[in-house]
Image (cartoon, coloured by chain):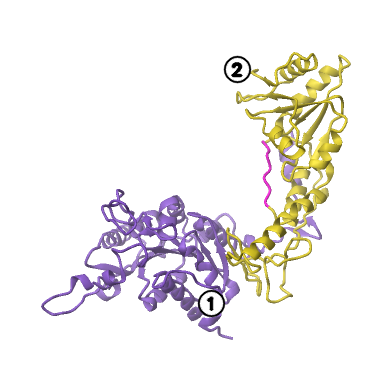
Chain colours: A purple, B yellow
């Protein structure tokens, strides 16, 4: 029986601020799961700490609300143990690119088959709006006493530099486009990264919904408003690495990096980079454990009638002195 | 090693995390046949629906599902949660959940065999309390004293939290002088002892040079204590 969109929602009261960009992301995740008809017990949403941390409680799949900056460690563990499951990690920009930046880079190098979504609003919304790692140098959002003194991390650039094999950006108010990106990310064989731009209506008074809509850059002569957001796929941009050639990989990596630097009046969304030539972690594991996929850790039996089924006597023999 | 397996099983049973304070060490070969694995209330199939991962139960332990188990969906959070595992700030829910979790301390004290909580190596008017890697040199020092017909008792405390207060109290009921031997500056076991038994230890023998204790320096300090010539804190320094 096909599940409906409502089957992926929980009854948990949502206390995000009215107009929060988080709503669009949760809706898009639920829509993606419903459209792909993924059984609810075959998916798990991992979340970090912050406003976005509650994401897992609003989605009716397994939901693991983890630690600040550590969402990728939990999610990767689950993905390696349960390769059949759809694993989505969701966390804030402060969570994933501040304290979690080390895990972000390490995850890229592994390329485990899962999806990581960063809710990117430039501020630490839950704790009163301090500058997050993606807020630009010199910008002063509502609750900062003085302009930001730190340079911003470029999430897309960091992802392509770290080995993520699917790198994309969405916008939380374009829910349908975001849903399509999430589906593409889940289907990708390897580690997918989605940078989702989202206004924080309470604390980020610079990158607001109106700002993204470009109301401040109205073309006076034509009396038209041009959204800052545009889609890479509408420009003929090809993010895919087609051949196993270093020159092509380098070309696709560099064009993604260059695109990631676009900001201001034109902000690209869509898929920046996609490489299915680099082996997913499961394949690398199978070099060492040929039956890994048939017998992954989550399915392994460790005991029978209260007794271990593994014979360790040979190991003990080898350790005896 | 066998004990470690046993403790790991009992931790699974009581749904708590355990911290084992141990160094790498050698041990006698153990019989793998004697190892038992008890995974507690781990479910293979969900019979009662809707499933509640943190259901209130009479023994304070809820049957646990695992990722991927059909009808066994649950949520986890590091904050307080309701029976499904959803984050909750409901004050009454908090009381129920905290009472449930903390009731497991009594369960653990009842479940873990006494000999795994505290090991007694004999009692005397003077008794050492200690934990961990100091055991070997302490036993050697006690043997050295025995040759001089001096008896010193020793209990090795293995379970630090929940602290086996009543059992330690009963073991030490006739002891006159308690000596805490530890490889740290503050005498951490002594602090736990005071917290739980409501009385201070009489002497500390401490070493924090980053070197292991030797039997001879423990012996020297014990001699000083027995001869009423020791300071409250005896600080050991052997080793280059």
Q: Which type of secondary structure does the marked residue at label 1 adopt?
A: loop
Q: Which residues are magenta?
A: B17-23
Residue B240 marker: 2
Q: Is residue A171 above or below residue A123?
A: below
Residue A9 marker: 1
Query: Which one is nearer the viewer's eye here, B34 or A179?
Result: A179
Query: Which one is nearer the viewer's eye here, A168 or A273?
Result: A168
**Residue depth check, mark 1 versus mark 2: number of the one nearer the observer:** 1
Q: Residue at x 15, y 79 (%)?
A: A223
Query: Which one is nearer the viewer's eye here, A231 or A288?
Result: A231
| Res A278 visible | yes
Q: Residue at x 45, y 69 (%)?
A: A16
Determine whether, in the image, residue A18 is placed left or right of residue B17: left
Q: Is residue A315 above or below residue A57?
A: above
Q: Quadrant of residue B126?
A: top right
Q: Quadrant of residue A141?
A: bottom left
- Asked if the stretch drawn in magenta spans residue A156, the answer is no
């Amino acid at each position: 029986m096909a599940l409906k969109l409502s089957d992926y929602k929980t009854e948990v009261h949502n206390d995000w601020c009215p107009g929060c960009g988080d709503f669009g992301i949760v809706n898009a995740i639920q829509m993606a799961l419903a459209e792909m008809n993924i059984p609810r017990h075959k998916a798990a949403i991992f979340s970090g700490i912050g406003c976005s941390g509650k994401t897992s409680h609003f989605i009716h799949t397994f939901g693991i609300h983890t630690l600040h900056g550590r969402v990728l460690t939990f999610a990767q563990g689950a993905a390696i143990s349960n390769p059949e499951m759809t694993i989505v990690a969701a966390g804030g920009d402060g969570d994933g690119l501040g304290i979690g930046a080390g895990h972000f880079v390490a995850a890229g190098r592994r390329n485990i088959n899962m999806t990581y979504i960063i809710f990117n609003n430039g501020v630490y919304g839950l704790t009163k709006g301090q500058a997050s790692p993606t807020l630009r140098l010199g910008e002063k959002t509502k609750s900062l006493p003085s302009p930001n003194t730190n340079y911003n991390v470029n999430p897309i650039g960091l992802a392509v530099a770290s080995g993520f094999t699917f790198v994309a950006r969405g916008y939380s108010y374009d829910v349908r486009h975001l849903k399509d990106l999430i589906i593409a990310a889940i289907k990708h064989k390897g580690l997918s990264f989605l940078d989702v731009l989202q206004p924080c209506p309470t604390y980020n008074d610079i990158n607001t919904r109106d700002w993204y809509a470009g109301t401040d850059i109205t073309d006076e002569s034509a009396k038209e408003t041009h959204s800052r957001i545009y889609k890479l796929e509408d420009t003929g941009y090809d993010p895919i690495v087609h051949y196993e050639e270093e020159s092509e990989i380098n070309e696709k990596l560099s064009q993604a990096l260059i695109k990631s630097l676009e900001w201001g009046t034109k902000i690209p969304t869509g898929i920046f980079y996609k490489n299915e030539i680099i082996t997913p972690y499961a394949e690398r594991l199978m070099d060492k454990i040929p039956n890994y996929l048939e017998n992954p850790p989550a399915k392994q039996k460790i005991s029978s009638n209260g007794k271990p089924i593994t014979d360790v006597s040979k190991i003990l023999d080898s350790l005896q002195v | 090693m066998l004990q470690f397996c046993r403790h790991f099983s009992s931790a699974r049973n009581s749904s708590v995390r355990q911290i084992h304070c141990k160094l790498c060490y050698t041990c006698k070969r153990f019989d793998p046949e004697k190892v038992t694995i008890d995974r507690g209330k781990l479910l293979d199939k969900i019979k009662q629906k809707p499933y509640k991962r943190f259901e209130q139960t009479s023994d304070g332990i809820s049957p646990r599902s695992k990722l991927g188990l059909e009808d066994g969906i649950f949520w986890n959070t590091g904050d307080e949660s309701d029976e499904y595992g959803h984050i909750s700030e409901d004050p009454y829910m908090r009381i129920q959940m905290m009472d449930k979790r903390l009731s497991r301390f009594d369960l653990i004290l009842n479940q873990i065999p006494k000999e795994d909580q505290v090991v007694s190596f004999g009692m005397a008017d003077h008794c050492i309390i200690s934990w961990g890697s100091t055991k070997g040199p302490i036993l050697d020092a006690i043997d050295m004293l025995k040759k001089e017909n001096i008896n010193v008792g020793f209990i090795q405390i293995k379970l630090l939290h929940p602290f086996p207060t009543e059992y330690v109290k009963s073991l030490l009921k006739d002891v006159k002088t308690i000596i805490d031997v530890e490889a740290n500056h503050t005498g951490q076991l002594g602090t736990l002892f005071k917290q739980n038994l409501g009385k201070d230890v009489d002497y500390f023998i401490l070493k924090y040079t980053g070197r292991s204790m030797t039997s001879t320096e423990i012996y020297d300090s014990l001699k000083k204590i027995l001869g009423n010539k020791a300071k409250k804190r005896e600080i050991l320094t052997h080793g280059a």
